[in-house]
């Protein structure tokens, strides 16, 4: 259970303080898949970093399973837009990272995750031999090995081509449905937000705050061409267009 109450985040700037997040209130149940969408500068990535414990200078309450988040820990996995793999390590060693493959339990868990992220046969491959989508799956497997309570994904597919991105969306849903790890996923892609999320959180910029939370009551797997999907997409788009035309409250730079 993730509970965020009255969260406010301000950055110092030469022209004066910039309010990045204002009065964020959110509750995420265990095992949920939540997507976040909003224009640049609305604080989506800042919010993820706070939940990850990478930023602790804020006002308000951020709790995971009843405990205040005071810093990074293994119960919170973070996936960046770039895979950030060690180029001198093979796939299996990148997944294990600081854990020894000489440990039979670790090796078994790594092999299970390699199968889960569909990389069987690439255990001995190096990052330079992988496609962008494959490398990102290694990063996801590495995070899952630590058995996090929550996995935070900051535009992880933003640098991929359209075909690979679609494949990765489907792969991530398979991983989520098998692991039931709580996932918070930031994206600029409206279709991606509706395709993946059980709920879509729409954020306003300057200062960043939650405009609306839309439940996506569609079964998985979802068909983008289906009428129900398009109806929900139109609803999210309508809210997003209201965000795009909202008046600016300050002139802060994108955060």
Image (spheres, grey):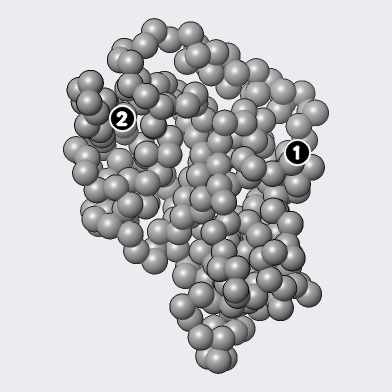
Please report the residue visible at 50 percent of the width from the left and 44 percent of the height from the top: 154
Residue indicated by mark 1: 162
Please report the residue visible at 24 percent of the width from the left and 55 percent of the height from the top: 70
Residue indicated by mark 2: 21
Please report the residue visible at 54 percent of the width from the left and 83 percent of the height from the top: 106
On-image quarter of the C terminus: top left
Q: Is residue 19 left or right of residue 30?
A: left
| Residue 8 image position (x, y, % from top left) | 24, 32
> Which labelled disc corresponds to residue 136?
none
**Viewer can see residue 25:** yes
Q: Secondary structure at mark 1?
A: helix
Residue 13, compared with residue 113, is above or below; it is: above
Mark 2 burial class by Cα count in 10 Å: few <14, some 14-19, many 20+: many
Q: Earlier in the sequence, mark 1 or mark 2?
A: 2
| Residue 152 image position (x, y, % from top left) | 47, 50
**Viewer can see residue 215:** no
Please report the residue visible at 37 percent of the width from the left and 39 percent of the height from the top: 46
| Residue 12 image position (x, y, % from top left) | 22, 31
| 100, 117: nearer the viewer | 100
**Residue found at the very far front of the displayed protein:** 14
Q: Is residue 230 left or right of residue 57?
A: right
């Amino acid at each position: 259970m993730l509970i965020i109450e009255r969260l406010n985040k301000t950055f110092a700037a030469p022209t004066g303080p910039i309010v990045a997040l204002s009065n964020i209130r959110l509750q995420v149940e265990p095992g949920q898949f939540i997507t976040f969408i909003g224009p640049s500068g609305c604080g989506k990535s800042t919010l993820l970093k706070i939940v990850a414990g990478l930023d602790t200078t804020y006002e308000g309450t951020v709790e995971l399973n009843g405990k205040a988040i005071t810093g990074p820990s293994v119960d919170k996995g973070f996936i960046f837009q770039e895979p950030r793999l060690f180029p001198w390590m093979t796939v299996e060693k990148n997944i294990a990272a600081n854990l020894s493959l000489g440990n039979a339990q670790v090796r078994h868990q790594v092999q299970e995750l390699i199968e889960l992220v569909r990389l069987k046969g690439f255990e001995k491959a190096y990052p330079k031999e992988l496609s962008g989508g494959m490398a990102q799956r290694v990063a996801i497997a590495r995070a899952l090995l630590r058995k996090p309570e929550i996995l935070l994904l900051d535009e992880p597919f933003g640098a991929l081509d359209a075909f690979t991105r679609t494949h990765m969306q489907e792969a991530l849903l398979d991983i989520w449905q098998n692991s039931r790890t709580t996932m918070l996923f930031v994206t600029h892609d409206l279709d991606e937000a509706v395709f993946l999320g059980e709920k879509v959180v729409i954020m306003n910029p300057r200062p960043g705050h939650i405009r609306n939370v839309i439940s996506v009551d569609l079964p998985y797997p979802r068909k983008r061409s289906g009428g129900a999907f398009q109806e929900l997409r139109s609803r999210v788009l309508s809210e997003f267009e209201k965000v795009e035309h909202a008046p600016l409250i300050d002139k802060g730079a994108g955060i």
